[in-house]
Image (cartoon, helix red, strand yellow):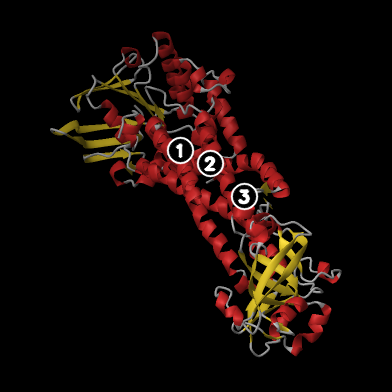
């Protein structure tokens, strides 16, 4: 094996430009695959963090009638906050949220919204609810930057809000935008107005009630109050996990195209090598190599392309990927319109597992692609090969 | 001719299938070749010289009859055994040198020793010794493309001789060389034959080679026409 490795390395080096072309194409594939996977990993990590920080918390209790996909369920989806949460509420370690439908009229237009009442002293979500504490307005409201830009709203603006209380009676008032927050989580931004919980409870005639309770700690999952169902953070993040999984599957198409290009180059080189180097193959056999050794030599030559490609990719790829991991990749401008949890800047995450898996997959694929044409050598007659006669 | 027989051939036939039927390249060859012989199989093109050499060199197998080389029947050898025989006991010299193009002169000559798994210092010593015999010490780092035809063939001889094989099979070794180079090469081979007692078997129709032979086996249409000892 050591001998074959030495010979293969020498032959590969001797092949000159042909080798370098293959190695460059292959190293590019290496890099793009790792980069793309790293980008998805980075997106996954950021999206999960953002969702936990802005929406999901460590899990949620849902009032048993609550169904986020059925707006009609909101009419019944409210109950008194269980007393077992009293201490946690005082400490701000649970964020109760009351949700109802409403309408605002920005710039003379009508816009359906979700009105969400949240306790001002909560410490679970990143929403700047502390702003409610210093405010004496009738209905102080926080909105996200997308909601603000979609409706042409800015801090200090007052708009009419209409809602329907627990008795089914429509009511309306002026709300004042006291703050605009920026988040990557569209589900807390688009079409949402956040107001103080006690204010919404009063508006709805639902004192002490909430629709969901957002937990700050996973240990709160054990409380299990009656009439409330617990949703773990994993369940709540499933949509993001599924989306990224789907994107990863889509990425396979890219890998297949890149790998096909690289493998085609190697396959072509191997076929050409075997065609052009028949005399050499005959000489190896005449000098005492077995056919299987020669097959091994040519296969090794092919697979060494991927080793060299790995080294080359490391030379220009490590600084490139490291720079991208520290500076991130900008999605500014487009990210807000995607409706996905997508930060303005994504920081790719490259794990050792990702790099090792990519290297192993490419190495195995290259070896198979190198072996396939090399099998022809086993069928060659050495006497014909020595004369360089086509077989 | 010395007593110990290295090559023994009995009723050897080699038949190749062709599109129109079959072609008999060797048709009942009987001969023996002993140690330290300097023998040539001579004859016109298509007479079966190269086929005979290929069978002796275990690169091909007989269709009928027996070819025993260094005590081993070529027909009975499997692929690995045949490779081992070539690797350890036989040396080949080809008409078109068949040097490995990406290797230097040193590496080309070293190659058979690598297959024998000799250690580096031993390899180096043997390669340098071999290159010295052939007067190639100044070309150690050259690649085949940088050498003349004569130099290439000398490298090929060095490669064939470096492991001190029992038999060297040379197929038209001077066909691509001019007269001066041919004589140089042949003188070297005669010297190696005398000093190392290596058996040389040539396939040739070159008169220059024939003039150096100690035994001439004339082949016509796959049959031995004449087998004569040449006394110089």
Name the one closer to the observer, A352 or A335: A335
Q: Is residue A371 left or right of residue A172?
A: left
> Contact, CB < 8 Å: mark 2 with mark 3?
no
**Horizontal relation, residue A360 to residue A278: left or right:** right
Above or below residue B209? Residue A150 is: below
Tell me the CA gap for discs 1 and 2. Answer: 9 Å
Q: Quadrant of the C terminus of chain B?
A: top left
**Could you tell which of marks 1 and 2 lies nearer the N-terminus?**
2
Which residue does the numbered mark 2 point to in the structure image? A26
Please, which chain is the residue tagged with disc 3 on? A
Query: Is residue B31 something that shows in the picture?
Result: yes
Which residue is at a point 76% across and 89% down the rendered structure image? A83
Q: Which residue is mark 1?
A: A265
Among all residues in the image, which is located at the extreme top? B180
Label 2 or label 3, whichever comes before in sequence order:
2
Disc 2 sits on a residue from what chain? A
Q: How crowded is the residue under tag 3: few (<14 C-alpha within 10 Å), some, or many (20+)?
A: few
- The residue that disc 3 covers is A334
Of labels 1 and 3, the one closer to you: 3
Name the quadrant of the N terminus of chain B.
Answer: top left
| Among the 4 quarters of the image, the one containing residue A97 | bottom right
Mark 1 and mark 2 in contact? Answer it, CB < 8 Å.
yes
In three-dimensional space, the C-alpha distance between marks 1 and 3, rounded to whole angstroms, equals: 37 Å
Residue B67, placed above or below residue A73: above
- Is A332 rendered above or below residue B104? below
């Amino acid at each position: 094996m050591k001998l074959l490795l030495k010979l293969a390395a020498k032959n590969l080096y001797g092949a000159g430009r042909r080798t370098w072309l293959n190695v460059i194409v292959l190293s590019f594939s290496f890099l793009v695959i790792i980069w793309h996977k790293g980008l998805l990993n980075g997106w996954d990590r950021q999206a999960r963090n953002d969702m936990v920080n802005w929406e999901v918390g460590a899990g949620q209790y849902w009032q048993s009638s609550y169904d986020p996909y059925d707006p009609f369920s909101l009419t019944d989806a409210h109950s008194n906050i269980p007393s077992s949460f009293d201490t946690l509420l005082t400490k701000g370690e649970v964020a109760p949220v009351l949700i109802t439908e409403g309408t605002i009229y920005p710039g003379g237009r009508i816009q359906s919204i979700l009105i969400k009442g949240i306790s001002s002293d909560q410490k679970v979500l990143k929403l700047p609810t502390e702003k409610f504490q210093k405010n004496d307005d009738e209905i102080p409201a926080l909105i996200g930057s997308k909601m603000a830009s979609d409706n042409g709203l800015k801090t200090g603006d007052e708009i009419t809000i209409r809602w329907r209380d627990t008795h089914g009676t429509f009511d309306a008032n002026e709300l004042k935008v006291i703050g605009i927050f920026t988040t990557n989580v569209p589900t807390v931004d688009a079409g949402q107005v956040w107001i103080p919980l006690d204010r919404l409870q009063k508006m709805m005639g639902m004192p002490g009630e909430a629709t969901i309770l957002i937990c700050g700690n996973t240990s709160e999952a054990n409380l299990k109050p009656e009439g409330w169902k617990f949703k773990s953070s994993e369940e709540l993040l499933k949509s993001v996990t599924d989306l990224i999984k789907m994107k990863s599957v889509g990425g396979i198409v890219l890998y297949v195209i890149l790998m096909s290009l690289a493998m085609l180059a190697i396959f072509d080189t191997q076929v050409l090598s075997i065609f052009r180097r028949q005399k050499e193959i005959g000489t190896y056999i005449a000098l005492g190599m077995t056919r299987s050794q020669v097959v091994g030599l040519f296969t090794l030559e092919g697979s060494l392309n991927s080793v060299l490609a790995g080294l080359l990719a490391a030379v220009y790829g490590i600084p490139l990927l490291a720079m991208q991991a520290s500076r991130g990749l900008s999605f500014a401008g487009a990210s807000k319109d995607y409706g996905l949890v997508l930060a303005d800047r994504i920081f790719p995450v490259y794990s050792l597992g990702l790099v090792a898996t990519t290297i192993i997959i490419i190495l195995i694929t290259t070896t198979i692609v190198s072996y396939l044409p090399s099998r022809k050598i086993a069928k060659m007659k050495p006497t014909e090969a020595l004369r360089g006669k086509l077989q | 001719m010395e007593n110990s027989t290295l090559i023994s051939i009995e009723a050897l036939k080699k038949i190749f299938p062709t599109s129109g039927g079959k072609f008999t390249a060797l048709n009942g060859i009987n001969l023996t070749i002993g140690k330290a012989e300097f023998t040539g199989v001579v004859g016109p093109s298509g007479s079966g010289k190269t086929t005979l050499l290929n069978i002796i060199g275990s690169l091909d197998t007989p269709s009928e009859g027996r070819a025993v080389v260094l005590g081993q029947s070529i027909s009975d050898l499997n692929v690995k055994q045949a490779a081992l025989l070539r690797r350890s006991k036989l040396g080949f010299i080809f008409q078109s040198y068949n040097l490995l193009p990406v290797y230097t002169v040193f590496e080309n000559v070293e190659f058979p020793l690598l297959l024998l798994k000799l250690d580096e210092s031993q390899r180096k010593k043997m390669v340098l010794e071999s290159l010295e015999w052939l007067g190639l010490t100044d070309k150690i780092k050259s690649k085949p493309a940088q050498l003349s035809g004569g130099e290439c063939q000398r490298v090929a001889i060095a490669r064939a001789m470096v492991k001190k094989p029992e038999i060297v099979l040379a197929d038209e070794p001077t066909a691509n060389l001019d007269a001066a180079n041919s004589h140089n090469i042949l003188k070297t081979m005669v010297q190696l034959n005398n000093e190392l007692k290596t058996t040389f078997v040539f396939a040739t129709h070159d008169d220059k080679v024939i003039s150096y032979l100690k035994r001439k086996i004339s082949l016509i249409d796959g049959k031995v026409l004449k087998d004569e000892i040449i006394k110089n």
